[in-house]
Every structure is written in C-alpha cells, then in structure tokens.
Image (cartoon, rainbow, N blue to C red):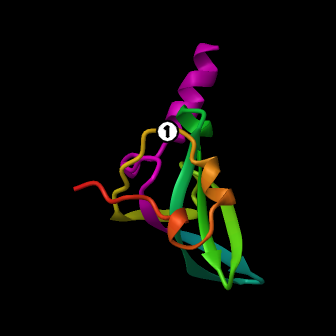
Amino acid sequence: MNQLELISNGSLKAEAPKFEVGDQVKVHCRIKEGDKQRIQIFEGTVIAKRHGGVAETFTVRRVAYGCGIERVFPLHSPNVEKVEVVRMGKVRRSKLYYLRDRVGKAAKVKERL
C-alpha cells in the first residue's frame, strides 16, 4: 500500500486549483482531434466534488440553449489545463444536485463577498 501511495503522490499536480462547490469556474481542457490539439473552455457552476488524492473529480453544470449539460473532470488529469474561478458562490450544501430541477434565475447561486 505504501508503494501505491508513492506512485499516486507522484502524479498529483503541483499546484491544484483552489475552488469550492458553488463557484462558477472556467475549465480549460485539452481536446485531441486527429493529430491536432486545442484548448476548449467549459464554463459553469461546480455542483459536486468527489473522492480525494489522485482520483479527485469535480462536476461542472451549465445550461446551453435551454439544455442542461454536466461534465465530470478529473482534477489531476493532464487533459485539464487549468481551472479559473470566475465568481465564488455562497452555498450550505456539499452537493448541489437540486439545481438540476430549477429553471432560469432560480438555478443561480448567490455570490460570496
């Protein structure tokens, strides 16, 4: 078990981005199309963070053209270039799955000052 921890600690990112559930973030992820690579930005609200260590993931939700889109990103993946915090949200829950049922302004999270 000790060797497994050493390997997993070696693959952690040196400076992991600091954000919490409820924050609005821009995730810069690397997309590979054929032999080319490009950076695509996915902006939305963080509704969940799971696990810890090398297996840590976070779920980002956005609404585009009236359709809700959720993506799960591994935090320490080499495909996740960087995570920018656009605004910090004020929430009292660790998982914001209730936002799936809300529409319009009711689906917004208050801003933390």
Question: 10 Å neighbourhood of mark 1: few (<14), some, or many (≥20)?
Answer: few
Could you tell me which residue is drawn at 37 percent across and 55 percent down?
A: 89
Of residues 82 and 70, the one drawn nearer to the viewer in this rendering: 70
How many numbered marks, from 0 up? 1
Q: Is residue 66 above or below residue 88?
A: below
Q: Is residue 10 above or below residue 68?
A: above
Position of residue 16 measured from the top left corner of the image (x, y, whole percent): 41, 48
Q: Residue at x 62, y 69 (%)?
A: 103
Q: Residue furthest right?
A: 34
Query: Is 17 within the magenta?
Result: yes
Please state the extent of the stretch shown in magenta in the rendering. Answer: 1-27
Q: Is residue 79 above or below residue 50?
A: below
Amino acid marked by disc 1: Arg
Name which residue lies at 54% across and 41% down: 11
Q: Percent position (x, y) of residue 36? A: 67, 85
State left or right for residue 14 relative to residue 9.
Answer: left
The answer to whether residue 89 is above or below residue 32 is above
Which quadrant holds residue 29? bottom right
Was residue 87 drawn as part of the magenta stretch in this picture?
Answer: no
Q: Nearer the viewer, residue 81 or 18?
A: 18
Residue holding disc 1? 93
